[in-house]
């Protein structure tokens, strides 16, 4: 592996969240220390997410996966609760941990006001 980074960050494409995510990444990670996978729905399609994590692990030797879902996500449709997002984040985390036991996985629920809630 010729070049490495710390993490892959997976989040939705929704334009409303991008400046919040940019600021949060700047505050929490060293510049240029992460891959970024922008997927409609965040972890909505977990196999797309796994594919990106696999590539990031093979090419860049990451040690951490950061998964961010958000409030009022169009991929989930209207009326979807935070519980549903928390469930999906937990399931995605479990799958990734099973496939990539050496990776740390952190999950977050991002509110439309820009608040990041750590999901556990
Ligand atoms: Zn979304």
Image (spheres, rainbow, N blue to C red):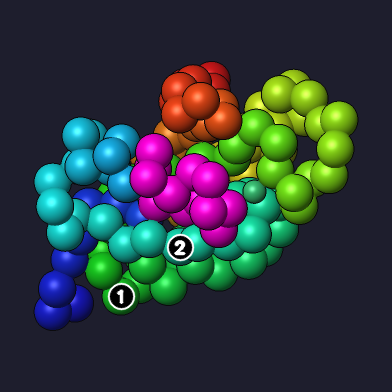
Q: Which mark is residue 37?
A: 2
Which type of secondary structure does the marked residue at label 1 adopt? helix
For residue 120, above or below residue 109: above
Question: In terms of depth relative to the viewer, which is nearer, 59 or 37?
Answer: 37
Q: Position of residue 19 (x, y in %)?
A: 37, 45
**Which residue is at a point 49% across and 43% down the rendered structure image?**
17
Q: Position of residue 116 (x, y in %)?
A: 45, 25
For residue 65, above or below residue 34: above
The magenta segment is 9-21
Please report whichever mark, 2 or 1, sits nearer to the chain's N-terminal start: 2
Q: Quadrant of residue 39?
A: bottom right
- Label 2: how many Cα within 10 Å (few below 14, some 14–19, many 20+): some
Residue under label 1, please give it. 59
Judge from the rendering whether residue 56 lies leftward or rightward of residue 53; answer left or right.
Answer: left
**Which residue is at a point 76% across and 52% down the rendered structure image?**
75
Which type of secondary structure does the marked residue at label 2 adopt? strand
**Which residue is at a point 17% across and 66% down the rendered structure image?**
4
Which one is closest to the eye, mark 2 or mark 1?
Answer: 2
Q: Position of residue 86 (x, y in %)?
A: 67, 27
> Does the residue at mark 2 contact the one at mark 1 (Cβ under 8 Å)?
no
Marks 2 and 1, Cα distance to the nearest angstrom?
Answer: 14 Å
- Please tell me whether residue 11 belongs to the stretch shown in magenta: yes
Judge from the rendering whether residue 8 lies leftward or rightward of residue 109; answer left or right.
Answer: left
Q: Is residue 19 visible?
A: yes
């Amino acid at each position: 592996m010729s070049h490495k980074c710390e993490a892959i960050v997976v989040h939705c494409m929704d334009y409303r969240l991008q400046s919040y995510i940019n600021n949060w990444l700047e505050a929490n990670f060293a510049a240029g220390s992460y891959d970024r996978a922008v997927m409609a729905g965040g972890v909505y399609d977990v196999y797309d997410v796994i594919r990106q994590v696999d590539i990031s692990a093979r090419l860049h030797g990451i040690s951490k996966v950061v998964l961010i879902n958000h409030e009022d996500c169009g991929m989930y449709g209207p009326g979807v609760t935070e519980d549903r997002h928390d469930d999906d984040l937990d399931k995605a985390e479990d799958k990734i941990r099973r496939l990539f036991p050496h990776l740390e996985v952190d999950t977050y629920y991002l509110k439309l006001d820009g608040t990041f809630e750590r999901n556990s």
